[in-house]
Image (spheres, rainbow, N blue to C red):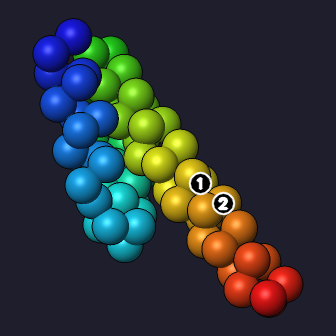
């Protein structure tokens, strides 16, 4: 559990570009490497967290742009 909290805290400090780069690296590793079930589950969980983070950043940016346009 402590490790999972660290990962989430670490994600919150990332830029959008850093998160996307890590997602791409995870996808490459899933395609190119033999993954055991533990590694697979960890990588998928990490990618899921990163994707959620990126979506949240995109929605926030969209909201910010809409506010600027409305002004």
Taking 63 as reference, is 50 above or below it?
above
Q: Quadrant of the C terminus?
A: bottom right
Where does label 2 land, which residue? 59
Taking 6 as reference, is 67 above or below it?
below
Residue shown at 35% from the left, 59% from the top: 19
Q: CA distance from mark 2 to mark 1?
A: 6 Å
Q: Element type at marker 2? A: helix
Q: Position of residue 33 (x, y in %)?
A: 27, 43
Residue 44 in view, yes or no: yes
Disc assigned to residue 16: none
User: Is residue 7 or residue 41 the one in the foreground?
Assistant: 7
User: Is residue 65 or residue 42 the one in the foreground?
Assistant: 65
Whether the residues at callouts 2 and 1 have beta carbons within 8 Å, the answer is: yes
Q: Is residue 53 left or right of residue 69?
A: left
Q: Position of residue 18 (x, y in %)?
A: 30, 66
| The image quarter in which residue 41 lies | top left
Q: Position of residue 5 (x, y in %)?
A: 23, 24
User: Is residue 40 or residue 33 the one in the foreground?
Assistant: 40
User: Is residue 27 or residue 55 the one in the foreground?
Assistant: 55
Mark 2, other Cα within 10 Å: few <14 / some 14–19 / many ≥20: few
Q: Is residue 68 left or right of residue 36?
A: right
Taking 65 as reference, is 56 above or below it?
above
């Amino acid at each position: 559990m402590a490790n999972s909290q660290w990962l989430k805290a670490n994600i919150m400090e990332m830029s959008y570009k850093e998160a996307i780069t890590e997602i791409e690296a995870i996808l490459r590793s899933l395609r190119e490497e033999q993954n055991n079930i533990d590694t697979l589950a960890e990588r998928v969980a990490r990618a899921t967290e990163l994707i959620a983070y990126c979506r949240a950043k995109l929605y926030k940016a969209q909201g910010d742009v809409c506010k600027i346009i409305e002004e």
